[in-house]
Image: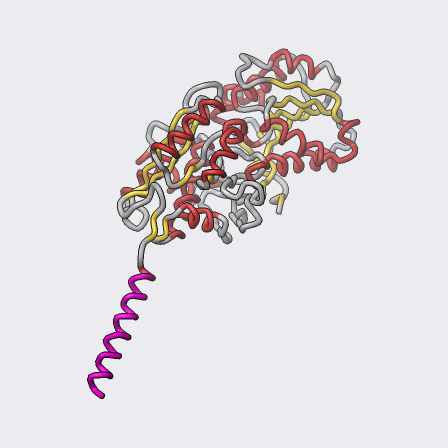
Amino acid sequence: MRTKWCAASVAMIATILLASAAHAQKKYGPGASDQEIKLGQTMSYSGPLSVFGTIGRAEAAYFEKVNAEGGIDGRKINLISLDDGYAPPRTVEQTRKLIEQEEVLALFSSLGTPTNAAIQKYVNVKKVPHLFLSTGASRWGDPHQFPWTMGWGPNYLQEGRIYGRYILENHPDARIAVLYQNDDFGKDFLKGFQDGLGERSVQMIVGEATYEPTDPTVDSQITTLKASGADTFFDIASPKAAAQAIRKVYDIGWRPRHLLQSVAASIASTLKPAGLDHAVGVISSTYYKDPTDPQWANDPAVLAYRAWMKGYYPAGNPDDVYNVWGYSQAQTIEHVLRQCGDELTRENVMRQAANLKELQLPMLLPGIKLNTSPTDYYPIKQVQLMKFDGKQWVRFGGVLGR
């Protein structure tokens, strides 16, 4: 009888130990191991939008900090960041290299609307997480058709609607001219703006002009838009073209009410090149703390950000909001990877990315938090309007969005 009891006890203990071992077993997909987590991205380090290259450099610098502090549960993050020059064919080539040769666990923060659009179907067929993209196009929030692709910042349709509603509510008789980049980035913003104006958009928009990212200037477009008789100007341009537009508007004596979408709302990269005095009164929107705003001078999050810049990215400009973007996007993927625990598979990375709950990043404005679900792929959904006073952006009104 005792022998039977001992045998049963041994069997039970063995079963418990096996179950415990199975429970603790680590699961890895491509690009993950006990030592490393390999991420990939394409970034515009050259070409017409090279100003955004600092986003990738900031992200690499943030991961240096994470690695110096022990990594993700002892695993070092290895970000492979390749230049695509904002050219979609090159994006395809570099992304194939990241997935098929480097075998990254996930793609993270790749830059640009047309560039990411060129790879979206491919990465979804390959079932590779395509996360927290450096573009706000509305197409990054379609989990039914593209379950492996997720944006990060407020989407362009939503932001465009907010500007449209602002004009409709405060200046219902406005005559509006629009400059927009001739791709999905520009068209998304324009569509949202028209939606915000509603049925009045056809009457209120009296002039439209497009430009290509490779165009040397937008001077002729601005001259044409002034001739439309508009008293309001919606500037849907990347930083270089937006700076040219602000300067040209001022130089030809046109003084419209000026709206500038948030992608180009950098004092360092857009307003200073345009001339700060030329940008007085420009209205835009934000969802992050501007490190140049005296309001945040002693804010612990901004002080920590500046200390990180000094220690890990001294060549970068801490006043450039694109570095705030990179810093915050990197914190988002860090949170997801920590949430994955020891199950670092592509499936679980995507599952955790779609399970962000009230995530408050240090450099986001108070009250703005990241939330996602399997049916909601827009992590940040709120912005606040702001106006440039010649020295800094001054926020006004409440937080808008959902």
When asked about the image quadrant of residue 20, the answer is bottom left
Magenta-drawn segment: 1-22
Task: Return the x and y of residue 146 as percentages of the image width and height.
Answer: 54, 40
Q: Nearer the viewer, residue 340 or 50?
A: 340
Residue drawn at 48 percent across, 50 percent down: 359
- Residue found at the far bottom of this picture: 1
Q: Is residue 185 left or right of residue 85?
A: right
When asked about the image quadrant of residue 93, the answer is top left
Determine whether 376 is above or below 183 in the image.
Answer: below
What is the magenta segment's predominant secondary structure? helix
Q: Nearer the viewer, residue 79 or 275?
A: 79
Residue drawn at 58 percent across, 29 percent down: 389
The reply to whether residue 294 is visible in this rendering is no
Q: Is residue 10 magenta?
A: yes
Q: Is residue 248 left or right of residue 14?
A: right
Q: Nearer the viewer, residue 126 or 350?
A: 126
Determine whether 183 is above or below 323 in the image.
Answer: above
Q: Is residue 321 left or right of residue 28?
A: right
Task: Return the x and y of residue 134 as percentages of the image width and height.
Answer: 49, 34
Task: Return the x and y of residue 202 as percentages of the image width and height.
Answer: 77, 27
